[in-house]
Amino acid sequence: MPTPTPGYIKNMIRRSFREIIDPSPSKKDEKRIWKFFNYECAYCGKKLDKSKKEGHIDHLVSSSCGGKNHISNRVLSCASCNEKDKLDMDWQEFLKSKISDKNLTETRKSKIIKWQKQNKFQPLNQRLLKEIELVSNSVVAFYDKKTKYIRDLKNKTL
């Protein structure tokens, strides 16, 4: 687990509320993802060993760009593609930049699109999303206020 800095904690608060209406894939869903992508990175095709925890369940459209947690937006990825190369890049553009062979790019793209079609996404309730954002912002503001209070108290006692 990363160091629990205030920024990390605030991000976790927001994610935990979002998780209520946009849950991450279950362990069963993750197994389906591994099986569908044949234990290979959906982008570069690298063979992945689940027992060595080599694979990542990556967002096709990153959450920072509005991507959902639904399994239709998740694929199996190697660490390099997920953490270093793709980042917030559009997944189709990433495939084109990652693979020079156009036929192979098209094959991988087709497989991802097949996955998406098999796992149709139900749109999230926008009213609930807005409510969760309001609640999250309220809790984060309270956290900020109490963090400042504790820091001020600490500074007075030193």
Image (spheres, rainbow, N blue to C red):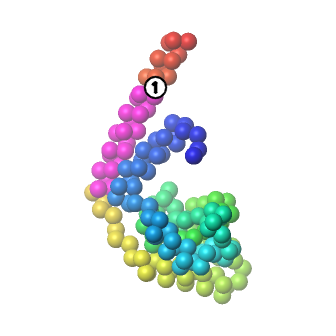
Magenta highlight on residue 129: yes
In-front residue for pair 50/121: 50
In-front residue for pair 42/66: 42
Secondary structure under the numbered disc 1 in the rendered image: helix
> Which residue sits at x=52%, y=65%?
59
Judged left or right of residue 148, residue 125 is left
Q: Residue 45 falls in which quadrant of the image?
A: bottom right
Q: Amino acid at mark 1?
A: Lys
Residue farthest to the bottom, as pictured: 103
x, y percent for residue 37: 57, 77
Q: Residue 110 falls in which quadrant of the image?
A: bottom right
In this rendering, the answer to whether 100 lies above or below 56 is below
> Which residue sits at x=40%, y=60%?
23
Residue farthest to the front, as pictured: 51
Magenta stretch?
A: 128-147
Magenta highlight on residue 157: no
